[in-house]
Amino acid sequence: MHTALATGAVAESSARPGGFPPGRWPPRATAGPGSRPCNTASPSARRKPPAASALGAAEYRAGNYGAARTTLGRAEPLTPAGLAFLAMTEQRLGRHDQARAALDRLREVSAKREGDEDEAAALRREAEALLAGTPAGHSGG
């Protein structure tokens, strides 16, 4: 059985969980000929808060905590979502003081914002639950 990938390539679905053969994980989908793979951002894009937050979130969700910390650590100021992922990343890496500091920054930012966005509020709750040692919606790994 074959599975079509976003890049148009075909992989043997039994070769690896998710249908990706060895050497094709993680998938490196592109927007078109000559474009940059979606999981490699330019160095300047990695420092811009929205891009860094999105890339850091993807790295965290994929279980790449070291890469997530590097990406999120380069961007200033981080978005509320980026701060939540930084707190969770630091916690997963065993850097509890840094995780607490990122969560405190997230709480400060959230308190200053009118009507905390649903996604940002949900991520803040997830980070708080992780730091408190209780299960949350996503385990991140």
Image (cartoon, helix red, strand yellow):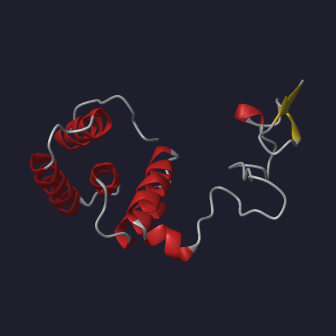
On screen, 66 above or below 136?
Answer: below
Q: Position of 133 compared to 104: left or right?
A: right
Residue farthest to the top?
1
Report how many numbered discs are placed on residues in the image.
Answer: 0
Q: Measuring 30% from the left and 30% from the top, which residue is drawn there?
A: 136
On screen, 116 above or below 33?
Answer: above
Q: Measuring 15% from the left and 47% from the top, which residue is drawn there?
A: 113
On the image, the x and y values in percent for residue 86 come to 32, 56
On the image, the x and y values in percent for residue 42 come to 59, 72
Which of the 4 image quarters holds residue 138?
top left
Q: Measuring 22% from the left and 35% from the top, which residue is drawn there?
A: 125
On the image, the x and y values in percent for residue 119 come to 32, 36
Q: Measuring 77% from the left and 33% from the top, which residue is drawn there?
A: 19
Quarter placement of the N terminus? top right
On screen, 129 above or below 68?
Answer: above
- Comparing 47 with 59, the one in front is 47
Residue farthest to the front?
114
Q: Position of 117 compared to 23: left or right?
A: left
Q: Position of 3 compared to 86: left or right?
A: right
- Comparing 98 with 5, the one in front is 5
On the image, the x and y values in percent for residue 122 come to 28, 34
